[in-house]
Image: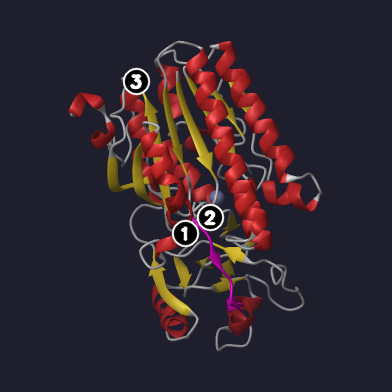
Amino acid sequence: MNVLISLDGISYQSFEPYAQQWIENGYSFCQKLITTFPSVTFTAHAAAMTGSHPGKHGVFDNIVARPETMERVALYGDHEILCNEALHKQTIFHSLARQAGTSCCIHWPMTSGNPYIHHLITESGSKKKLKSKVSVEEIDHVALRETMRAIKTEAYDFISARFVGYDALSHQYGKDSPEAMRCLKELLTYLDQIEQTLKKTQKPFNLIIFSDHGQSDIHSFFYPNEILAKSQWKQHFRNKQIKFVGDGSGALLFYSSLDYQQNKEIMAFFEQMPEVHHFYELTGDTPSACSPFGILDLKHTVCGEDIAFPEQPKYQEMKSLHGYHPANVDEMNGFLLCLGDAFTKSKMIEETNIENIAPTLAQLFRIAHPCDGQPIKDIFKEYE
Ligand SMILES: [Zn+2]
């Protein structure tokens, strides 16, 4: 049985003080798991389960736009605009099912309707649930209970689960707040319970634990649509030809139906602003209808929102965020731990990429899984 656990939002730096204890307990440890750009939950989890870059799996953010109408589409609750057969077929669940392997998936973004998962408890929008006063503790209790139950049934070859508590409390109170840190410690005890439950089965197992991205504290806010609405491109903005889309994030997607030259001019205009780190133009294949023209990466501690008058800011109470390019803001990166029959004991490696998770699982199952990533050979006994 192979188990994959995602601890949402814990940066590699926040985990570092605990690492030694895990290594001593036999876990191999990858200090830095390089995440996706934008460093957001849906993009990162799509990368982990497909083994491919956003350019291939098509999930560029937690929020996208329909390019024809510029209508904003939140992916919370797994909207079928991107959570569909094209994505499901790229997942490790699909490759496993083709070889008659069974899987169970709990609270993992972008899995709704995935027909290759045998027991599915979908992610139903942790942010949404927070607003509706369902506590994150309760959400994670369900994830723990279901994970343990799935292990005990011994009915699945693969179990994957995600825990949202630290990420949610970090957004709300700050990444180093007592609330977030208490939750982090609690989640570590959950991992211990999962490990003990696996050991009790007395069957071979492998356990991989990772975090999808980190968090940074917010110092200022940036509203690029407000700027477009007053700029020389204001008519295009009013005509819904251009728009930034982002959800209280360090990066915003830029959608445009203007010609290439005009887009480049808009990019140059924003690039000289003090809040902007870099405006990335997306090139190559555009796998989905929702691929943006570019992604605006903000400077560290700047929070971007896509509001325009008369909309009011929604995230001014938020304390921490993510989304920045992980090569620019180091604390956007996560970490990875692994323990089990196939893995070397107590080995430390410096870094690997989040896209390598799916091919590493494929290696554990000895199945083919076409994707961009590579198995993390350094952690396997067989390559010692
Ligand atoms: Zn996340």
Q: Nearer the viewer, mark 3 or mark 1?
A: 3
* Percent coordinates x, y for residue 245 in the rendering: 59, 65
Question: Local crowd at mark 3 within 10 Å, few (<14), some, or many (≥20)?
Answer: some
| Residue nearer the viewer, 64 or 144 | 144
Q: Residue at x 74, y 38 (%)?
A: 138
For residue 153, side relative to residue 89 (left or right): right
Q: Is residue 18 magenta?
A: no
Relative vertical location of residue 176 with respect to residue 226 in this rendering, above or below: above
| Residues at marks 3 and 2, CA–CA distance in whole angstroms | 35 Å
For residue 169, side relative to residue 349 (left or right): right
Label 3 residue SS? loop
| Residue nearer the viewer, 182 or 63 | 182
Question: On the rendered image, what quadrant is the N terminus found in?
Answer: top left
| Residue that carries the numbered disc 3 in the rendered image | 341
Ligand 1 within 8 Å of disc 1? The answer is no
| Residues at marks 3 and 1, CA–CA distance in whole angstroms | 34 Å
User: Mark 1 touching mark 2, by CB under 8 A?
Assistant: yes
Q: Is residue 216 magenta?
A: yes
Label 2 residue SS? loop
Of the residues under marks 3 and 2, which one precedes in the sequence?
Answer: 2
Q: Amino acid at mark 2?
A: Asp
Of the residues under marks 1 and 2, which one precedes in the sequence?
Answer: 1
Which residue ends up furthest to the right in the rendered image?
Answer: 133
> Which numbered circle lies on residue 38?
1
Q: Amino acid at mark 1?
A: Pro
For residue 287, side relative to residue 6 (left or right): left
Which residues are drawn in magenta? 214-224
Ligand 1 within 8 Å of disc 3? The answer is no
Relative vertical location of residue 263 with respect to residue 146 in this rendering, above or below: below
Q: Residue at x 34, y 44 (%)?
A: 30
| Residue that carries the numbered disc 2 in the rendered image | 61
